[in-house]
Image (cartoon, coloured by chain):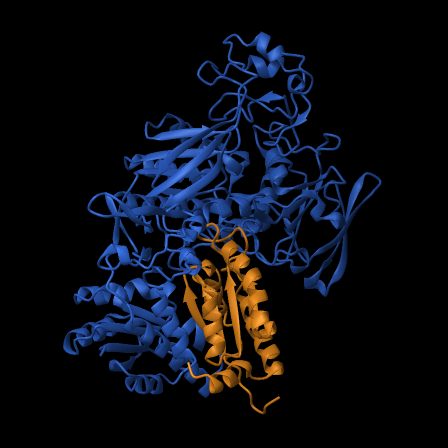
Amino acid sequence: MSRIGVFICHCGENIGATVDCEKVAKTCACLPGVEHSVDYKYMCSEPGQSLIREAIKEKKLDGVVVAACSPRMHEPTFRKACAEMGMNPFLCEMANLREHCSWVHAKGDATTEKAIDLVSMMVEKVKRNKPLNPIKVPVTKTALVIGGGIAGIQASLDIANAGQKVILIEKEPSIGGHMAQLSETFPTLDCSQCILTPRMVEVAQHPNITLYTYAELESLDGFIGNFKARIRKKAKSIDETLCTGCGVCTTACPLKKNPSEFNMGLGTRGAIYVPFPQAVPNKPVIDRTKCTYFKTGKCKLCLTKCPAGAITYDQQDEIIEVPVGSVVVTTGFNVTGTDFFSEYGYGKYKDVVNGLQFERLLSASGPTLGEVKRPSDGTVPKKIVFIACAGSRDPAKGIDYCSKICCMYTAKHAMLYKHKVHDGDATVFYMDIRAAGKGYDEFVRRAIEEDHVNYIRGRVSRIFERNGKLIVRGADTLLGAQPVEIEADMVVLATAGISNPGSEELAQKMHISYDKYHFFSEAHPKVRPVETNTAGIFLAGACQSPKDIPDTVGQASAAASKVLALFSRDELTREPVIAVVNRTAPPLFSTCVGCFMCQTACPYGAISREEIKARDGKILKTVASVNPGLCQGCGTCVAFCKSKSIDLQGFSNEQVYAEVMELLS
Amino acid sequence: MEENFEPKILAYVCNWCTYAGADLTGTSRIKYASNVRIVRFPCTGRIDYNLLLKAFALGADGVIVSGCHPNDCHYTSGNFHARRRWIVFRQMMEYMGIDMRRIKFSWVSAAEGAKWADIVNTTVKEIRELGPAKEFSTMNKEVTI
């Protein structure tokens, strides 16, 4: 007979207010095999855990069921508590009474009944749990950082400065990301590039960092400590070892009219180009979709002009495979496209620009060298309207969330504009001002009080052109929704921050979760904010949700510290939830018939053929065998096995059938 | 339809998407019918269709099978195997006399807490209308397993 201990947690009021925990504990005490059953206010607290520990000792328990929150939350906590008493941690299971019961059902008998069912189901499972030993795996002490914006730069430098190796990949020709595009940063009005570019150079020169720009992740396989990343180094069409970065080719290129991505289409670049003067690496790439040579086979001006002979038209994409122990995903964000705001004329009127475009107009390295000029005619706008929440917090546009950074950068834009155009007039339409952050609210107040930016609370319904002016029609909701019409020279939309195109695809390559807006999901919104649900893969920056630079840097350092904690060990232990082929004492009688359906189903190639030989070497039988290092424990093989000879530890047939049978008994 | 019929519904879900999605339903405090009991599996690929037969044999009124969306599987391809198996077994189970309206196959990601509540509620509602599953219980009386 089993000696199971059942521990029902009230979770304060969270479970206790809906489920009659006392009744659950009493009912469960009568279940066959249950030796001990109690309820307690907070099982995860130290007194709660010691209740478990003492019961294990006193009642000589051989299995524990903790009925509390989701096992995704506290399973490690309780398994550790059990292990402290010498019990095998895999003899402890959790029944999810909070997320799956008390939080989703009303108080009542039916809810308590469900709670009893969930606990008795786990009791039946635990009776069949077997002691398991964690699997030891080595750690490859190299981190892969995907995305070379400020998050990727910070994470890479932190890991590299701690003495570990980093591979940083960036899909653009230069690292720097969106931060390199910014003019000044709030709330201090520090020059963004002055903060960023030294760090970019540090990345390029760091002995522990291998930098691949113009490179993308092709695939990622493996598991924590032992990933295998395939990286596509896109053909730059230049030999980086020969190129000196002199820039002769970029001046020689006759195609000067391509819109520059870095300048958000407000400036131009050649077909062979360096995205911006401070680019790292400061070596050009050829945009093959634009280059005349790649279209017609003629031109070759860059080839003839290059003094180093570095132009290589026949360069191919190269795919390299690197072993890495951990991955930090820092792919950043994007802003909504022009098709998003037909009512604001974005994409139709040249002088309706987005926040990033306005950053380029303000930037000393921008297309106007820092002078605010209208993109249409190059005149200095005397009246600018800023529209906050252009897309954000707008369920009608499909973006319910707050993009978080817009209130602050809009205040900054208005302020910088007033600093540059003293007689200019700046008006901001806003929904709410969300300026939570150190020195943030003071900054917005400064814009309003010292720089006299006119803030109007209300939405803009329409923007249209009349006599060369942009007519902004909106309402002032603080004046009883009184209509407002402003004749503006220029309009800046604080467009919503959205996930990068292709982020869904990238998440699928790495097997990490993402939310409905395609931002990557953290493992837990509060206590595991930089981890993903896939062990060994971490997140930082705006790829998780829109966030400002300080938050991004903080999160990047947090991710780096997680990586370093992982790398501080030479060996990891992994949960032994893996498949095993049943073996009988004389292996000849193994029930495996050698159909190898499991082998065809296994996504990891973890199943191999094992020959059972007689003493004279004659092959008696070929059976399946699982490599515990490769098996990830999905159990697909188990469902395929016709002779029920392969089973999954921790989710064995015996266990799951017992659960189902208990629920329906 | 019987008076006060409370359907017994089992949900076989994968750990990474739907189980986490159901956790999110809880965290978001979205209410749903309490008739469902969730059984956790590492992956929908692990879900043996004998488990569905077992559930009906033991008197379940309905079964929900749910996992990660196509391409989102934590284990690369387990959900594709589940989907294929579903297509094959569906015909077999139909042939065996199981009312296919009692089985709900769906994808619920870790971010779709509201969708989970919705699936549970519609399943409960539909099964309530169908009434208790009697096919197997009558068989059980004739043949004792």
Question: Residue A661 sits in which quadrant?
Answer: bottom left
* Residue depicted at 19% across the width and 46% down the height: A615
A601 left or right of A404 in image = left
Quick one: A265 or A18, which is closer to the camera? A18
- Whole-percent x, y for residue A581 in the image: 32, 56
Chain A palette colour: blue
Displayed quadrant of residue A130: bottom left
Q: Residue furthest bottom?
A: B3
Left or right of A2 on screen, residue B145: right
Tell how many labels: 0
The residue depicted at 49 percent of the width and 70 percent of the height is B52
A130 versus A122 height, above or below: above
The residue shown at (54%, 68%) is B116
View extreme (right): residue = A467
- Identify which residue, A8 or A587, lies in the foreground: A587
Q: Is residue A111 left or right of residue A91?
A: right
Q: Position of residue B15 (x, y in %)?
A: 43, 61
Drawn colour of chain B?
A: orange
Specify the quadrant that holds the C terminus of chain A. bottom left
Q: State the image coordinates of residue A202 (x, y, percent, origin top left).
A: 38, 29
Residue A265 x %, y % = 66, 32
Image quadrant occupied by the N terminus of chain A: bottom left
**Left or right position of A504 against B74:** right
Residue most extreme to the left: A58
As rendered, which of A286 and A225 lies closer to the eye?
A225
Q: Is residue A569 visible?
A: no
Residue displayed at 62% across by 42% down: A355
Can see residue A573? yes
